[in-house]
Image: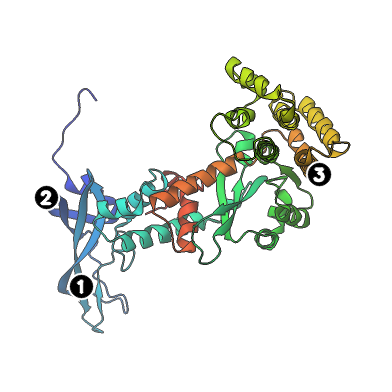
């Protein structure tokens, strides 16, 4: 603004009190804190019981943590007048519901700021509590309660879900209790390229029964609307999806298929390493030196890497490693092919080739072939629904790992689920004007 129009200072508007039904009447500023003295604008001097007029009795001060001004903790000292009815003697105080919930320690504006800080800015609860000059428990309780009320508990949160992803997640690394939870992700925005995947829910445990119970808790219309379920190789999730979502298509995502192939390659390399040298890989061993290069796609190999592979494969004792490496490269080639139909043909041919007639020496390839044949329908379904994978699910798992690290771990699963939903549920508080 090149030519601003200046008016007299308005502390009420500047601090956002006009939307709370308050009026600023004074201030006290120190380097580490701001205190705003204010009054309630509406007199509220009619008896709430009989409707007769009341007379002022006394005044009390209610303290509320407010949105920080320049990261300086700001506290509202609200002077609340109490009245006594001239007829029935009933005593009441001015209505402050516009400014804060009953018995709350945060103003509605301060609560909105805290929730936006947690959801949008990914602040820790400790940082929010410090900025509001309240205890950690006060900030955490207020944020989670408000988040549940206006975000997590919204009835339309599950609307429009057509593609879901399911995976397990380790929420704590202790021996006490179940450390696993099942996470359910909405992959519809990622498939339709309308946004990012979002966390739908998190349930304690990892089993067929857990996922089945969660699906059964959803309305039948919602289940009928689900078209695709992306998952890893765990058969419990597949069985639950087949039972509760009979019309949905199960897709085993590329990440886990490639991981299975990579694991077979690693086990082959380790076995041949022991058979040829009598010890685990060491610096200078040919197979140990190419352990990472083996997992690089053939079209991404540099000349130096390709030369190292060829040198290792010239040793006849490493023939089994080379054969398994070729299988791994075929899996990568199928998923990286720009034409899904051709990728499907490559994968179909590969599954047929390693499902039977494989030399007994390639024991890891035989095991891989059995697994791929058993899940062939789920694996090939990916090529009919390109873009549907558990990749976004793994990305959200990474965000939850970061959340747990920022909080230095969680002990309460209910708090962890609520914080995870606020962190990765795709919420944007600024789009919800009812917050605060």
Q: In whole angstroms, how far apart are the C-alphas of marks 1 and 2?
A: 28 Å
Residue at position x 60%, y 20% from top? 305
Secondary-structure class at tag 2: strand
Location of residue 37 with respect to 348 vertically, above or below = below
Pick the residue in front: 60 or 288.
288
Sequence-first disc among 3 and 1: 1
Q: Nearer the viewer, residue 245 or 281?
A: 281
Q: Label 3: which residue?
A: 370
Task: Give left or right: position of 82 versus 398.
Answer: left
Image quadrant in which you'd find residue 409: bottom left
Query: What separation in Å lies between label 3 and label 1 (alpha carbons)?
Result: 78 Å
Q: Residues within 10 Å of mark 2 (few under 14, many from 20)?
A: few
Residue 124, compared with residue 94, is above or below; it is above
Disc ID at residue 139? none
Horizontal and vertical percent for residue 70?
22, 43
| Residue bearing mark 1 | 82
Report x, y in % for residue 14: 21, 44
Regarding mark 3 in the picture, which secondary structure is present there? helix
Query: Callout 3: 10 Å neighbours few (<14), some, many (20+)?
Result: some
**Residue 432 visible in the snapshot:** no
- Judged from the image, the secondary structure of the residue bearing numbered disc 1 is strand
Of pointers 1 and 2, the one earlier in the residue sequence? 2
The x, y position of residue 401, in whole percent, is 48, 48
Residue position marked by numbered label 2 in the rendering:
29
Mark 1, residues whose alpha carbon is within 10 Å: few (<14), some, or many (≥20)?
A: many
- Measuring 14% from the left and 41% from the top, which residue is drawn there? 9
Q: Quadrant of residue 86?
A: bottom left
Q: Is residue 316 visible?
A: yes
Nearer to the camera, 33 or 398? 398
Residue at position x 44%, y 52% in the image: 404
Tags 1 and 2 touching, CB below 8 Å: no
């Amino acid at each position: 603004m090149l030519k601003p129009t200046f008016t007299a200072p308005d502390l009420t508007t500047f601090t956002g009190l006009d939307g709370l039904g308050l009026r600023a009447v004074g201030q006290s500023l120190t380097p580490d804190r701001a205190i705003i003295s204010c009054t309630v604008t509406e007199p509220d001097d009619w008896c709430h019981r009989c409707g007769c007029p009341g007379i002022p009795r006394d005044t009390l001060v209610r303290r509320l943590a407010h949105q920080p001004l320049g990261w300086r903790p700001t506290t509202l000292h609200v002077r609340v007048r109490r009245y006594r009815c001239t007829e029935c003697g009933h005593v009441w105080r001015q209505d402050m519901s516009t400014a804060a919930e009953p018995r709350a320690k945060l103003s509605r504006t301060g609560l909105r700021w805290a929730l936006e800080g947690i959801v949008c800015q990914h602040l820790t609860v400790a940082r929010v509590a410090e900025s509001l000059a309240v205890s950690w428990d006060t900030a955490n309780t207020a944020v989670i309660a408000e988040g549940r009320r206006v975000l997590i508990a919204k009835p339309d949160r599950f609307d429009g879900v057509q593609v879901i992803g399911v995976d397990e997640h380790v929420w704590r690394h202790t021996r006490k209790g179940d450390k696993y939870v099942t996470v359910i992700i909405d992959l519809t925005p990622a498939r339709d390229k309308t946004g990012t995947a979002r966390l739908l829910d998190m349930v304690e445990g990892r089993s067929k029964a857990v996922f089945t119970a969660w699906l059964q808790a959803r309305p039948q219309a919602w289940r009928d609307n689900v078209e695709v379920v992306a998952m890893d190789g765990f058969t419990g999730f597949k069985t639950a999806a087949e039972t509760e979502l009979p019309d949905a298509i199960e897709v085993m995502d590329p990440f886990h298929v490639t991981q299975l192939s990579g694991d077979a390659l690693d086990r082959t390399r380790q076995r041949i390493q022991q058979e040829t040298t009598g010890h685990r890989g060491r610096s200078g061993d040919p197979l140990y030196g190419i352990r990472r290069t083996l997992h690089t796609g053939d079209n991404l190999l540099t000349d130096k890497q390709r030369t190292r592979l060829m040198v290792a494969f010239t040793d006849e004792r490493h023939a089994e490693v080379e054969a398994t490496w070729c299988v791994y490269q075929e899996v990568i080639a199928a998923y990286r092919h720009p034409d899904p139909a051709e990728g499907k043909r490559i994968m179909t041919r590969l599954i047929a080739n390693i499902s039977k007639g494989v030399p007994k020496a390639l024991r890891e390839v035989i095991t891989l072939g059995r697994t791929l044949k058993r899940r062939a329908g789920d694996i090939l379904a990916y090529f009919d629904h390109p873009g549907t994978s558990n990749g976004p699910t793994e990305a959200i798992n990474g965000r939850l790992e970061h959340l747990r690290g920022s909080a230095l771990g969680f002990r309460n699963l209910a708090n962890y689920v609520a914080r995870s939903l606020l962190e990765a549920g795709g919420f944007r508080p600024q789009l919800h004007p009812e917050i605060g």
